[in-house]
Image (cartoon, rainbow, N blue to C red):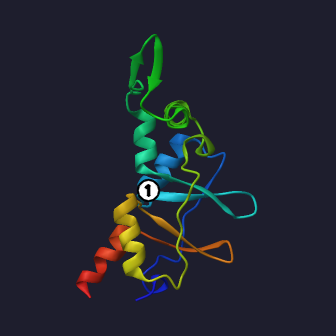
Amino acid sequence: MRIEEIMTKKVITLNEWDKVAEIAQTLLKHHLTGAPVVDKEGKVVGIVTEGDLMRRNALMHLPEYIAIQGSTVYLEAPSEIENDLQKAVGAQAEEIMTRDVITASPDSEVEIVAQQMIEKNLNPVPVLENNKIVGIVSKSDIVRLILG
């Protein structure tokens, strides 16, 4: 079965400049787990999920490190620490969104996309055709297949 057979075609999108409170309202109003962020040309540049909003409001964890002979060695990559900090203080979509968006195409096999969603903890996944968003698929779309 292909993704286009189960995807939601009417996609609620966010803009890069949307405020965090507006994003939360949009997700709640439409019962969404996340929404793609698009630029002025409609190109997907990120995604904001419930997890991104939760990280923004969670207590910031201090980076783990070890001290060796007077030097500090961080156990996390500096880019990850910076990314967490950015999300914790971000006020707009562009500051809290995940930029490395994994997408599917309409003719992707459901089983393959489902496996990616499980392995990479993705939800939802934007569906693109010719670099334009044509749909979105969530875990609940795939679970509905059980009902036939």
Percent position of residue 93, x then y: 59, 45
Left or right side of 26 for 134: right
Residue name at image x 41 percent, y 77 percent: 112
Q: In which quarter of the image is the C terminus?
A: bottom left
Q: Which of 77 and 104 is in front in this view?
A: 77
Q: Nearer the viewer, residue 89 or 119?
A: 119
Q: For residue 61, which quarter of the picture? A: top left
**Residue positioned most to the left:** 147
Q: For residue 130, which quarter of the picture? A: bottom right
Compared with 40, 79 (above or below) is: above
Compared with 29, 20 (above or below) is: above
Left or right side of 132 for 24: left
Compared with 125, 4 (above or below) is: below
Amino acid under label 1? Answer: Lys
**Residue positioned most to the right:** 41
**Residue positioned most to the front:** 69
Left or right side of 39 for 12: left
Percent position of residue 103, x then y: 54, 68
Residue name at image x 35 percent, y 68 percent: 139
Residue name at image x 46 percent, y 36 percent: 56
Residue name at image x 57 percent, y 55 percent: 100
Q: Quadrant of the N terminus?
A: bottom left
Count of marks, rendered view = 1
**Residue positioned most to the top:** 70
Percent position of residue 108, x then y: 49, 82
Percent position of residue 111, x then y: 37, 80
In this figure, which residue is indicated by the disc labeled 1? 29
Which class describes the residues within 10 Å of circle 1: few (<14), some (14-19), or many (20+)? few
SS at mark 1 in the image: helix
